[in-house]
Amino acid sequence: LQRLREGLARSSTQLTGSIGAIFTKRRLDEDTLQDFEDVLIQADLGVETALKITDRLSEGRFGREISGQDVRTILAEEIEKALDPVALPLELDLAKKPHVILVVGVNGTGKTTTIGKLAAKLTRGGLKVTLCAGDTFRAAAVEQLKIWGERTQSEVVAKAIGADAASLAYEGYDRAVENGSDVLIIDTAGRLQNKTELMAELEKIVRVLQKREPDAPHTVLLTLDATTGQNAMNQVEIFRNVAGVNGLVMTKLDGSARGGILVAIAAKFRLPVYFVGVGEGIDDLEPFKAKDFAAAIAG
Ligand code: GDP
């Protein structure tokens, strides 16, 4: 919680500063509500949520004086309400052996790092994990994944740069079965510049995996970089259509002033948010908790 609070400090300071400025000894009138709504939209919370919050605020309080503290309490409650339905734990079907997690997302959003942190969590919990270096375009991504493999004592299945990602995923699956892994985590390339190619590649990975296991991939995790704000919204749209995303991880919440975007994403897409990234280290991946997040952002 402390890491999250520190991480969201920039998002929170902007928001609470503006709230303080709006609600100094002012009666709640149309202007105050409008100013408040603008602040919420600037904080990336999304129009839908901003309207919900201002509506809730005006209920029974219109024309009366209201303190910044009261506003923050209501704000925290409403944010928690919006996030609660998506704050779900990542559940693994361990009978699958391996449960397959496909990790997708734009390059630089934190796929490889999140895979490493997740592998650490799972192996510490006594599970055996295999990692598959499916971003076959970038040597650095493969090298990074190998380092995470060493750190977490997880086997890494990799091929030469330029190799076919789908056939690598296929081999990764077989290898995970052979070595008795509980979980197989597959990294992928995230080149949005060429959407058609990206789509074809992800579809092929899925198709090939399903030859081995009809329900695979059991989890399709999308990593979103909190610092990119509204772009993250577009990325959910694209990857949900291309890859059948069924869960989210928001990375780089440490130091981002744009953490509010998670609220807009939750309201629009209603996809589970399994984890948040709060740093580059192995322990900097936390299960997503609506109440903690809401408290951290509303100050
Ligand atoms: P990929 O290209 O999607 O695989 O992204 P990487 O995993 O290589 O991450 C890109 C950069 O973001 C690296 O420098 C990571 O250390 C950094 N990064 C990833 N997650 C976080 C996070 O939660 N917080 C911070 N501060 N940095 C992160």
Image: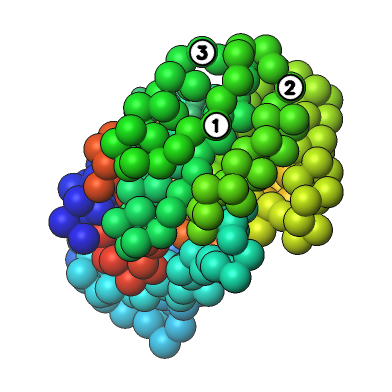
Check disc 3 and report the residue beneath it: 139
Which amino acid, mark 2?
A: Asp
Residue 115: x and y in percent read 45, 41
Structural distance between the alpha carbons of marks 1 and 3: 14 Å
The reply, left or right, for residue 9 in relation to residue 205 is: left
Specify few, some or many for label 1: CA neighbours under 10 Å numbering under 14, 14-19, or 20 or more: many
- Mark 2: C-beta under 8 Å from nearest atom of ligand 1: no
Q: Give the quarter of the image for residue 191.
A: top right
Secondary element under disc 1, as helix, strand or loop, is strand
Of tags 1 and 3, which is closer to the observer? 1
Question: Which of marks 1 and 2 precedes in the sequence?
Answer: 1
At horizontal 26% and vertical 59% (from top left) the residue drawn is 296
Secondary element under disc 3, as helix, strand or loop, is helix
Structural distance between the alpha carbons of marks 3 and 2: 14 Å
Of tags 2 and 1, which is closer to the observer? 1
At horizontal 46% and vertical 15% (from top left) the residue drawn is 140
Ligand 1 picture quarter:
top left
From the viewer's side, name the closer residue of 81 and 57.
81
Residue 147: x and y in percent read 35, 27
At horizontal 33% and vertical 42% (from top left) the residue drawn is 152
Residue 202: x and y in percent read 75, 35
Residue 44: x and y in percent read 48, 47
Question: Which of marks 3 and 1 precedes in the sequence?
Answer: 3
From the viewer's side, name the closer residue of 68 and 76.
76
Check disc 2 and report the residue beneath it: 164
From the viewer's side, name the closer residue of 86 and 91.
91
Check disc 1 and report the residue beneath it: 157
Question: Which of marks 2 and 3 precedes in the sequence?
Answer: 3
Which amino acid, mark 3?
A: Ala
